[in-house]
Image (spheres, rainbow, N blue to C red):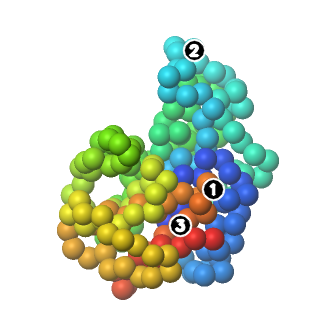
């Protein structure tokens, strides 16, 4: 069984089309699962007020044909959370965003966006992840990364890495701009970082 993990799309239809084509070419049997931030919210955190928007177009970027490409299960990211926080409408897309889970389990792994964890420092990075499972796939920082027991490892694209062991965290990178994704081979218990 193979999974293709992708996230941090931020409404970029061009980048998503390239990544989906790359997945289809390199791992056509893989089940796609998203790590959140599928959409881009155009209202920043600092500009949030008590005002509730009734039109999704006023708070998020929705390119024509983009929603039709989102045929895969995904966890919610901070962008989806913000969109839900500032909108009040019975639009079916908002209902879809509201139904996105915070975490998803696949095989022996967990998927989460990662904004729930502690981030900070210079440069801005993950400080602490509260996890009990392994491996855990996440996104949020737009940086492809593999860490074991809070130690980051050097990675190369196209090379399988073993993900057995405790506290293995895999950042799948970003679809937007970087066109990155990760192939998870459940049988071999490996991940391969990919770039379209």
Picture coordinates of residue 83 (x, y %)? Answer: 56, 32
Q: Report crowding for label 3: few under 14, some 14 to 19, many 20 or more residues within 10 A (C-alpha).
A: many
Picture coordinates of residue 167 (x, y %)? Answer: 23, 63
Do tag 3 and tag 1 residues touch (Cβ < 8 Å)? Answer: no
Q: Is residue 140 left or right of residue 12?
A: left
- Earlier-in-chain disc, 2 versus 3: 2
Can you identify the residue that label 1 sits on?
Answer: 177
Q: Which mark is residue 15?
A: none
Can you identify the residue that label 2 sits on?
Answer: 51
Q: Secondary structure at mark 2?
A: loop
Q: Residue at x 53, y 67 (%)?
A: 181
Viewport quadrant of the C terminus: bottom right
Instruction: Answer above or below: position of 83 versus 195.
Output: above
Between tags 2 and 3, which lies in front? 3
Q: Residue at x 50, y 50 (%)?
A: 36
Q: Residue at x 71, y 42 (%)?
A: 62
Closest to the observer: 83 or 46? Answer: 46
Q: Secondary structure at mark 3?
A: strand
Q: Is any atom of residue 37 visible in this view?
A: yes
The alpha-carbon separation of the residues under discs 2 and 1 comes to 32 Å
Q: Report crowding for label 1: few under 14, some 14 to 19, many 20 or more residues within 10 A (C-alpha).
A: some
The alpha-carbon separation of the residues under discs 3 and 1 comes to 12 Å
Q: Is any atom of residue 74 visible in this view?
A: no
Residue 192: quarter of image? bottom left
Residue farthest front in this picture: 122
Q: Which mark is residue 181?
A: 3
Viewport quadrant of the N terminus: bottom left
Q: Is residue 146 left or right of residue 4?
A: left
The alpha-carbon separation of the residues under discs 2 and 3 comes to 36 Å
Q: Secondary structure at mark 1?
A: loop
Instruction: Answer above or below: position of 162 versus 6.
Output: below
Do tag 2 and tag 1 residues touch (Cβ < 8 Å)? Answer: no
């Amino acid at each position: 069984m193979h999974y293709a993990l992708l996230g941090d799309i931020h409404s970029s239809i061009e980048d998503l089309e390239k990544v989906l084509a790359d997945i289809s070419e390199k791992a056509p049997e893989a089940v796609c699962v998203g790590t959140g931030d599928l959409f881009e919210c155009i209202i920043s955190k600092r500009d949030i007020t008590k005002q509730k928007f009734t039109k999704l177009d006023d708070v998020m970027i929705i390119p024509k044909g983009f929603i039709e490409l989102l045929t895969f299960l995904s966890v919610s990211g901070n962008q989806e959370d913000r969109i839900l926080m500032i909108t009040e409408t019975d639009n079916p897309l908002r209902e879809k965003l509201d139904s996105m889970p915070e975490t998803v389990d696949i095989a022996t792994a967990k998927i989460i966006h990662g904004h729930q964890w502690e981030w900070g420092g210079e440069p801005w990075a993950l400080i602490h992840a509260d996890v009990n499972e392994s491996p855990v796939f996440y996104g949020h920082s737009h940086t492809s990364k593999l860490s074991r027991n809070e130690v980051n490892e050097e990675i190369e694209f196209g090379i399988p890495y073993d993900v057995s062991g405790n506290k293995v965290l895999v950042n799948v990178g970003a679809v937007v701009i970087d066109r990155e994704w990760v192939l998870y081979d459940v049988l071999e218990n490996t991940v391969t970082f990919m770039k379209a």
